[in-house]
Image: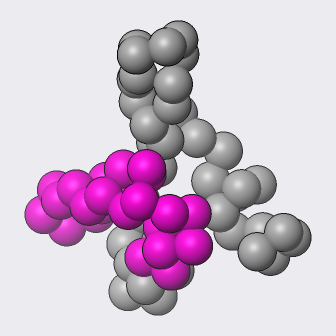
Amino acid sequence: MYRIEILSGALDVRYCFTKKSAKRLIQLFEEKNRMVHVTKFVRLHHDIFAWSAYEAELALYSDKGN
């Protein structure tokens, strides 16, 4: 799961379950000249999860593997 925070304009947060949907949402906001911050919900151990900074430029903007 990815959390996408829209930083420009009114602060807003959106959530996406898949990398593909997150990538499309990021592209939509960028087309409207919005700045975004992306974090990923990651498993740390068995039943422990946390939001982690995510390398959006490498993982979401790249066409490799998508």
27 part of magenta stretch: no
Residue located farthest toward the left when viewing the structure as drawn: 10
Residue 30 in sight from this viewpoint: no
17 part of magenta stretch: yes
Residue at horizontal 50%, vertical 80%?
24
Residue 57 in sight from this viewpoint: yes
Residue at horizontal 69%, vertical 68%?
61
57 to the left or right of 5: right
Query: Which one is nearer the viewer's eye here, 44 or 63?
Result: 44
Residue 41 in percent (x, y) is at 44, 37
Query: Which one is nearer the viewer's eye here, 9 or 51?
Result: 51
Please tell me whether residue 50 is drawn above or below residue 4 in the rendered image: above
Query: Which one is nearer the viewer's eye here, 24 or 30?
Result: 24
| Image quadrant where one finds the C terminus | bottom right
13 to the left or right of 29: left
Residue 18 in percent (x, y) is at 50, 63
Residue at horizontal 26%, vertical 61%?
14
Residue 47 in percent (x, y) is at 40, 16
Q: How many marks?
A: 0
Residue 27 in percent (x, y) is at 52, 80
Residue located farthest toward the right when viewing the structure as drawn: 64
Residue at horizontal 51%, vertical 31%?
42
In which quarter of the view is residue 48 placed?
A: top left
Q: How is the image coloured?
A: one colour
- In the image, which residues are magenta? 1-25
